[in-house]
Image (tube, rainbow, N blue to C red):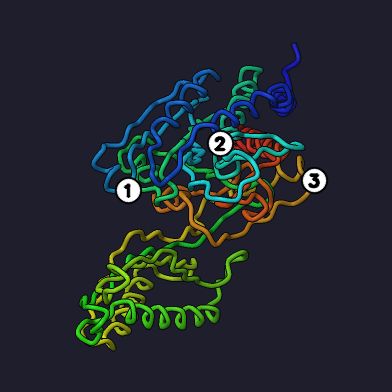
Amino acid sequence: MTKADPRAVIGETLAARRDEAVRFLAELVKVPSDNPPGDCAPHAARAALLLEHLGFAVERHPVPQELVRANGMASCVNLVVRERFGPGPIIACNAHGDVVPPGEGWTADPYGAEVRNGTMYGRGAAVSKSDFASYAFALLALKAASAAGARLGGAVELHFTYDEEVGGQIGPAWLLAQGITRPDYAISAGFAYGITIAHNGCLHLEVEVSGKSGHAAEPAKGVDALEAASAILGDLYALRRGYAAIRSRTPGIKSPTLVVGLIEGGVNTNVVPDRVVFRLDRRIIPEEDPREVESTLTAALSKSAARWPGVTLSARRVLLAAPFVPIPGQEKLVAAIRRSARALLGEDVPTHGVPLYTDARHYSAAGVPTVLYGAGPRTLEEARGHRADENLRLDDLHRATEVLALSLLDLLTACA
């Protein structure tokens, strides 16, 4: 009896299950998992049932509620699927099911999973519920190849987590810290036409500027926190302009950035404002030291506030995410994905960095060689990630799924 070609088995399996993969993704998009507020356990419950319907054994790992609350969420359950083919390394595939709230400006129901002209619209369709589908169906195809006689070693794990939008501390970082998983390699959610090997880190600070309230009829008897905050913000924006001179050596990443994204304060129209609070986002390029960035920025804020008599300033760290940088072993994942992508997409898939931050850094920080690769277009802007009308071309879902399955086949065949 002639042994089946495992690559052909993978292609035939995925071709036969294309519609099923689309339905699977649609069901995930239809269940809201906005973070904030971060009540994500219902989505995890639905995803677990869908995975079980595909034949997977699903481990549910609820995060202790005190940790959930400390991370600004309402509920969090991480899902793990394990498929072992023989002795050898474990390759983890991680995607996050939490999403940013939909916001305004949609031409489709953000939870409708509407398909128009071969493109699905919905919050999370591209970032990154799509990779729940691409990773799950790639693993199904790999299992079919194994059943047809492919000699494989090692194992594949699916890690579906729910806190990427608030930092990943109770998702991948928690799974690793608890010893629930100890992978040898990791592939995190990404896009189909590039392999991400590095990305920025991020510092979020909450800055409180305090003064003294007073009647608007006698403003000199108060200390105007808003006036001081306005000047402090001006100093921050001047500092930001200087970041353009700092350049990263990583292709795809340019310079550090700073954005003040939230601001609130004041008591009433006729009261001198005694308190202003704002939050800022400082992106950290791979060449920078995160703690040095934090120290330098907080010192600059304090120096600016010191110019205002009667004003005090405090800065509280909300998030400090280290940059994701290459570590030895990453090149094995890159080589396998590039080979498969070149054969299927008919083009070379470049390696690059991206200016955002992701859960991939948690695996890399634990010594696990990691790349980002998954379903999606060439850019986040094209996918409208974090914007109205987020979308995914379904052809990209199917292509990425086959690239992933063939890459895993190559990696695990080499271990048999």
Q: What amino acid type should be assigned to the residue bearing mark 3?
A: Gly
Q: Which residue is mark 2?
A: 111
| Badge 1 vs badge 2, beta-carbon distance below 8 Å | no
Chain-order first, disc 1 or disc 2 = 1
Which of the pair 266/170 is nearer the observer?
266
Nearer the observer, disc 1 or disc 2?
2
Q: What amino acid type should be assigned to the residue bearing mark 2?
A: Tyr
Q: Which residue is mark 1?
A: 72
Mark 1 nearby-residue class (10 Å; few <14, some 14–19, many ≥20): some
Residue at coordinates 32% horizontally, 38% vertically from top-left? 179
Helix or strand or loop: what does disc 2 sit on?
Answer: loop
Residue 196, image x, y percentages? 59, 54
Q: Which residue is mark 3?
A: 346
Residue 62, image x, y percentages? 32, 32
Left or right of 126, for residue 74: left
Residue at coordinates 58% horizontally, 60% vertically from top-left? 353
Residue 109, image x, y percentages? 60, 38
Nearer the observer, disc 3 or disc 2?
2
Residue at coordinates 50% horizontally, 82% vertically from top-left? 242
